Image: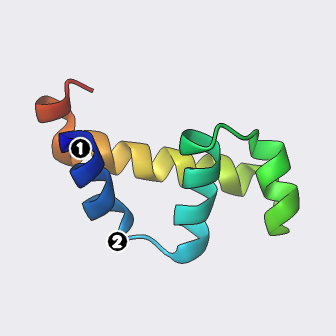
Amino acid sequence: MLLRQALKKILANFKDQTREAFWQVMIEGRSPAEVAQEMGVKEYIVYLAKSRILKRLKDEYGELLDL
C-alpha cells in the first residue's frame, strides 16, 4: 500500500511519456524494446525513464520502502 502511494506521488512529477514508459516496463512487464517501438522512441529513452523514476522513488522513499 505504501509503495503504491509513493509511486503515485512520484509519477505525478514526470511527463506522460516518461510515466507510460515506466509503467509499461515495470508494472506491465513488457520489454523496453517493445515499449520503445510502440512509443516511437529509442530504446535508451525507455531505460532512462525507468531509471529516473526508480531513482526518485529510492531518493524520496528508500528508507521507508527498504529499497
Tell me which numbered mark, 1 or 2, is placed earlier along the sequence: 2
Observer-nearest of 60 and 31: 31
**Badge nearest the viewer, 1 or 2:** 2
Residue at left offset 54%, top offset 47%: 50
Q: Is residue 4 above or below residue 16?
A: above
The tag on residue 5 is none
Residue at left offset 32%, top offset 50%: 56
Residue at left offset 61%, top offset 71%: 17
Residue reaching furthest left?
Answer: 64
Q: Position of residue 57 (x, y in %)?
A: 30, 46
Q: Position of residue 4 (x, y in %)?
A: 29, 47
Residue reaching furthest front?
Answer: 1
Please tell me how crowded label 2 is: few (under 14), some (14-19), or many (20+) other residues with Cα within 10 Å.
Answer: few
Residue at left offset 43%, top offset 70%: 14
Q: Position of residue 30 (x, y in %)?
A: 72, 41
Identify the residue position indicated by label 2 in the image: 13
Residue reaching furthest top?
Answer: 66
Res 66 quadrant in image: top left
Res 29 quadrant in image: top right
Q: Amino acid at mark 2?
A: Asn
User: What's the coloring here?
Assistant: rainbow
Residue reaching furthest bottom?
Answer: 15
The tag on residue 59 is 1
Left/right placement of residue 2 relative to residue 8 reads left
Q: Amino acid at mark 1?
A: Asp
